[in-house]
Image (cartoon, rainbow, N blue to C red):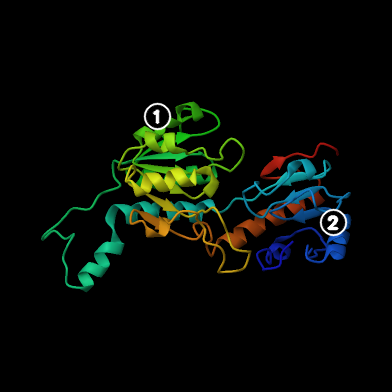
Amino acid sequence: MDNDGRLRLVPEYLRTPWKIEVADSADPSAFAQALRDADAIVSMAWSASFPPAPKLRLLQLPGAGTDAISFEHVPPTAAVCNAFEHEIGISEYVIAGMLEWTIGFRKLDPCIRQGDWTGSYICGPHHGEMFGKTLGIIGYGHIGREVAKRAKAFGMRILGCGRQSHPGDAYCESVRTADALDEVLAASDFVLIAVPLNSATRNLIDAARLGAMKPTAVLINVARGAIVDEAALFSALNSKQIGGAILDVWYRYPQQGHNRGPVPWNYPFNELENVILTPHASGWTDGLTARRNRVIAENLDRLARAEPYINLVRAASIV
């Protein structure tokens, strides 16, 4: 299902023959026919209202998040796979956000344009360094590892939280389970949220967890807005309970393809000075489409050749 060109390169990367159709849910009859005939479907959503798909063997997500997939309604004959490839752009965004927070180009530039040397060696004050700071990564997966790799190069200490504990790797000092989340929060100068949204992570970062953070710490959310309790976050920022936040994900969104829509927040984050706000742009880079389209084409080829899938989220239960 592709009506905005995000899958346009898939046919170019395919190595097996496929008939490709655009299935438009706005046309119920055509949509039902497309699902009835499909061996594979590329979609970020699957709901109980979808028509039957009796031949379906692969539901391929063109992105990473599975929160719009009603797994119990995906036919049991179908495997579900996703696609990452956004971790490069997101990790660069996170590093850029931490650098901006630490150095402050947004403040230095307009000052010197006005002849104001504030922040210089002449009159100060000093700006910070990322070197020696601690980055806590909540969700040490594809994104977490790529961020850790880059942050390590800046001389940062990396602590991780994941589903399973392990001693760490070349970039991360240690990865702890959720039982140690408060300890990681308390030790971190920057806290990166990089977990998927599910029943266990919704409002994972609540008032108590924000209270466990350093008063100078900065929360960075590139995952899903609902992982952080919105009211608690606004209160913590507004009262300066924490140092600030870099927020790329939100609580309400416009329709796909529209640059205007509902205000993304229920509290006036835009009135706060200790935040950097962006419109879910961190992973949306000029290299993303090609990388994801290659992954999608690879799994379609693997289906055609009866080979194991990559990025398998759920295997088919009926073969």
Q: Amino acid at mark 1?
A: Glu
Which residue is located at x 28 percent, y 58 percent?
104
Q: In terms of secondary structure, where does tag 1 sit?
A: helix
88 up-or-down from 262: above or below: above
Q: Is residue 219 visible?
A: no
Q: Amino acid at mark 2?
A: Leu
Q: Which mark is residue 183?
A: 1
Q: In terms of secondary structure, where does tag 2 sit?
A: helix
Judging depth in this view, the residue of 309 and 67 nearest the camera is: 67
Q: Is residue 190 left or right of residue 177?
A: left
Q: Residue 305 at what x, y percent from top left?
A: 80, 49
Tell me the residue that label 2 is attached to: 35
Which quadrant of the figure contains the C terminus?
top right
Q: Residue 244 at what x, y percent from top left?
A: 35, 49
**Among the two numbered marks 1 and 2 on one chain, the one whose residue lies closer to the N terminus:** 2
Q: Is residue 290 left or right of residue 305?
A: left
Q: Which mark is residue 37?
A: none
Q: Is residue 110 visible?
A: yes
Judging depth in this view, the residue of 2 and 48 nearest the camera is: 48
